[in-house]
Amino acid sequence: MFHLAAGRVGSLAAKRATAALSTSSARMMASHGHGTDDTHPPFHQQQLLVSALDKLRQDDRKRFRQVSTAVDMSKPLYTDSVDVPLPDRPYKEVLTDADKSLKQKEKGPWNQLSKEEKLALYRLKFLKTYPEMRHSTPEWKTVLGVAFFFLGLTGFVVWWQKVYVFPKRPRTFEGDWPEKQLKRMLDMRINPVQGISSKWDYEKGQWK
Amino acid sequence: MFRAVFRLSAAGARSLARSRPCSSAPLASRCYSHGKVETEEEFDARWVTYFSKPDIDAWELRKGMNTLMCYDLVPEPKILDSALRACRRLNDLASAVRILEAVKDKAGPHKDIYPYLIQELKPTLTELGISTPEDLGIDKL
């Protein structure tokens, strides 16, 4: 949604930019005179136009930039997965000096590492532990809730349609019309083999 | 032998009560039309050799471990011992702890496999100074 908004404003800004530039280019042409060709501005003025447009678009981009780090998909990625215990790269690749000295200590006997140091080494390499990976979230409640909400909304829409949109019921549903219709069907022996007339007992005058 | 008892597939779980520790019958009944069936001993030996490579590199350790976890079995203690020693050669304590976490998770509902593994690996763990996930407190959330 944010991107869409940025795009729309961006195009608006671009239109403003081109409008501004077209007037400024006219002024430029008037002040500097015409180039070799009467219909097009000279080459260096074209370059100025292009670079000015680019600058304006860059300014727009700076204003509407979202702070997000693009993931470099050409490099190994870190993933937490119960099926893949050892991911392609460690979680923390940029180490502080304390981390680096800990890594040096790791090269020696591990018996000399304290529990906290071992834990720190684990968290340097991995983001989540197995129980944390397996931990369920309450997201399903949100999903179900939103689904029910929209179902309810739909029900409201249907009720409104019933009141304001649907035409009147046909008269064939009112009064004794259905009863008379059924009697006529039985008299005509509609579907006598397996259908409605086969369910009617003509001797006794009742349903079988 | 180990895998014959603790085969993790549904069929295996169902036959858990009936199977005997010494039988290797499940393997013999595989429907290969041709080709030699690898015995469990050969499988274990192959993996122990893989992790025992003196100049094993980090990629090979990761690849080996991730592949091993894809199989429908919990690795024998000797394979894990070899893998933990490979971690030591690579100066990688975090991966050693991760391997222990992974096999515990791999055992799934069979809660008696992991304590057995730890019991078998205890000498190696104390020798190399590897703490179990329980010691570090990361077995709980």
Image (tube, helix red, strand yellow):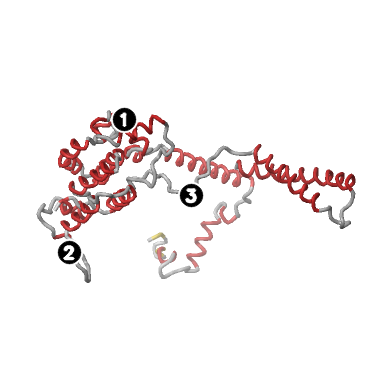
> Relative to B100, does residue B46 appear above or below in the rendering?
below
Say whether marks 1 and 2 touch (CB < 8 Å).
Answer: no
> Relative to A198, does residue A110 appear above or below in the rendering?
above
N-term-proximal mark, 3 vs 1: 3
Q: Position of residue A123 (x, y in %)?
A: 36, 35
- Chain to which mark 2 belongs: B
| Residue at x 52%, y 64% (from the top left corner) | A184
Q: What's the residue type where badge 3 is placed?
A: Met
Frontmost residue, A76 versus B74: A76
Secondary structure beneath label 2: loop
In the figure, is residue A2 to the left or right of A125?
right
| Residue at x 38%, y 29% (from the top left corner) | A98
| Residue at x 17%, y 57% (from the top left corner) | B40
Residue A73: which disc? 3
Image mark count: 3
Say whether marks 2 and 3 touch (CB < 8 Å).
Answer: no
Q: Quadrant of residue A62?
A: top right
Secondary structure beneath label 3: loop
> Relative to A131, does residue A183 appear above or below in the rendering?
below
Frontmost residue, B84 versus A85: B84
What is the distance, in whole Å, between disc 3 and disc 1 at their CAs? 32 Å
Q: What's the residue type where badge 2 is placed?
A: Ser
What is the distance, in whole Å, between disc 1 and disc 2 at their CAs? 49 Å
Residue A63: which disc? none
Q: Residues within 10 Å of mark 3 (few under 14, many from 20)?
A: few
Q: Nearer the viewer, mark 3 or mark 1?
A: 1
The residue beneath circle 1 is: A117
